[in-house]
Image (cartoon, rainbow, N blue to C red):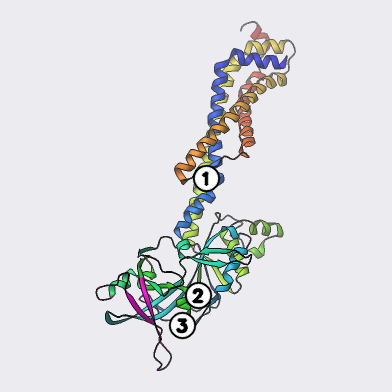
Amino acid sequence: MFARLVKESFVRNPRRKVLAASALILGMAIATSTLTVALEVGDRLAREFRSLGANLLVTPQSDTLPVEIGGVDYRPVDAGAYLNEADLGKLKTIFWRHNILGFTPFLDVPVSIETPQASKTLAATLIGTWYKHAVPVPDGTNFTTGASFTHPWWTVQGRWFHDDANECLVGASLAATFPGGLAPGATIQVAVPAAGDAPPETTSLLVTGIISTGDAEDNAIVTPLSIAQNLSSHPGQFRQLFVSALTKPADALASRDPKSLTPTEYDRWFCSPYISSISYQIGQVLPGTDVRAIRRVAETEGRVLSHVSLLLWVVTLAALIAAALAIAATSAATILDRQAEIGVMKAIGATNALVAGLFLAEELMLALVGGLIGFVFGAGLAHFLGAAVFGSPASPRVILLPVALGLAALVAVAGSLLPLRRAAHFDPAPILRGE
């Protein structure tokens, strides 16, 4: 009898059922699409932010402060501490190794420059780094990285140098200081001041391009790291390391000192890709280093990710509330139209729980249909939004199907509570008398 009453309700009031189902379909479609995008927005935006460059800087703990005048580092070559190039493969062995998208070592050397075309000699900084370099990893694989991964905004007129050649890039501002300027194809001589009266050893470099970065590199020479190591007599070493890592926005746990965490909190912190936990893990495989976040990049990423995630959750909540209000309106109208039926049921002994169960069964059936159809439409909407916003479609998440069905049921029940409460106070006698 219960099933028959539910069936008759759908047959007699198809328009209201279609309206209620449409509200649930729309609400679940929006919720499914926003939840799908929310699950991927962190990684997608983080990868987009990596076009801003590295977000971690690694230096020796005992390094000296640079002495720069007019963009030229006058610190002696032998001053300060160095890091070993051979240890860099260990970065791909940390817990969050797959979040390490790239890293680039840098070594600055003060040099003097002259060109065969002019007798003018200039003091400048030679910056040794990688363009695209294969780093051996302890597991036997190679990881290709370099400035093309960590500093993608650098622009070069001409071409980049080869990492194994005597080639270089000249900063745009430095190139303009030479008579007639420097252009790709020119040759320059660089030398490191020698101790005492010994003549400096010069190295000839082919200029392959003019580099513009908006930073100190515009007044420097950028060469393969091996050249800077040879000129400074520090083979296999470097001074700074820029790391580009995928991270999640910091929260209260991320800002705490790891030494103050309980074992459970420490495990959760260590297994979360916070910039602090990744920095800590880098410090473990590169002992004797100081790992610092580049705050202007990391903080901007965190704020944007938090705001976008909050917006998606607000849109989801608004869609669910709108669906619940639509269900409440249709349920109230349905109960008013069927108050005679409710009066008869109560007159023959039906309890309030039985009456409520009848209407809730109808709403749950609508929720099942609305949740299924809404999930399908939501997956398609998420696919479109992913392609439009991030350039690649968002993959449907089957795990969200039970979530969509559960939300649809919750919305249907929540929207029916107030009308059902009113139905529970119906007195059958006046209703049957037509009052």
Q: What distance separates the C-alpha of mark 2 from that of mark 1?
A: 40 Å
Asked whether the beta carbons under mark 2 and mark 3 sit within 8 Å of each other, the answer is: no
Residue 180 forms part of the magenta stretch: yes
Q: Earlier in the sequence, mark 2 or mark 3?
A: 3
- Residue 285 in percent (x, y) is at 62, 69
Image quadrant in which the N terminus is located:
top right
Residue denoted by label 3: 77
Local packing at callout 3 (Cα closer than 10 Å; few below 14, some 14-19, many 20+) is: some
Amino acid type at circle 3 is Val
| Number of marks in picture | 3
Q: What distance separates the C-alpha of mark 2 from that of mark 3?
A: 11 Å
Residue placed furthest toward the top: 433
Asked whether the beta carbons under mark 1 and mark 3 sit within 8 Å of each other, the answer is: no
Residue denoted by label 2: 239
Amino acid type at circle 1 is Leu
Residue denoted by label 1: 310
Residue placed furthest toward the left: 180
